[in-house]
Image: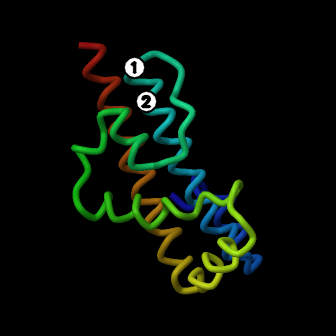
Amino acid sequence: MAERTLCGTIMFNSAKYLYTGFMCHQCIEKALKAYYVNVHNERQPHQHNLERLAELGNLFDKMNADKKDILKKLKPLYIATRYEDDKDDIAATLTKPYCETLLSETGVLLEWILNSMMSSNSSQCE
């Protein structure tokens, strides 16, 4: 699982916690978009809201409360268009222990999304 969150791990090991959070968000965003394309056989929505992406992919209702909580944690970490003050506020919350947990939770959620995609592929082949 660690290799699947490699960019986040590299940022974490460099003590760049703001970008650790961003990479975790990106990891799950891309996985949700891949799931959407796999299930709907069409281009993914231009969207960064993780909960919305999960809903559009018909995956949100299949998630337990823990997985939905991870999405909520990751949601504010999309930073590309944030104002500098927002980045500073977010960065203040991203401590080393918090990012360690975030990386672990991202790995768990990613694994679940990928397994869901694989089981979706299996049912389409039958």
Query: Residue placed at 53% from the left, 86% from the top?
Result: 97
How are the residues colored?
rainbow
Residue 66 in picture, x, y percent from top left: 28, 64
CB atoms of marks 1 and 2 within 8 Å? yes
Q: Where residue 49 sits: x, y (%)?
A: 48, 48
Q: Amino acid at mark 1?
A: His
**Quick one: which residue is furthest to the top in this view?**
126
Q: Which residue is mark 1?
A: 40
* Point 68% across, 72% down: residue: 87
Quadrant housing the C terminus: top left
Q: Secondary structure at mark 1?
A: helix
In the image, residue 44 above or below residue 101 = above
Looking at the image, residue 125 sits to the left or right of residue 6; the answer is left
For mark 2, what is the residue?
36
Q: Residue at x 48, y 16 (%)?
A: 42
Q: Amino acid at mark 2?
A: Tyr
> Which quarter of the picture shows residue 82?
bottom right
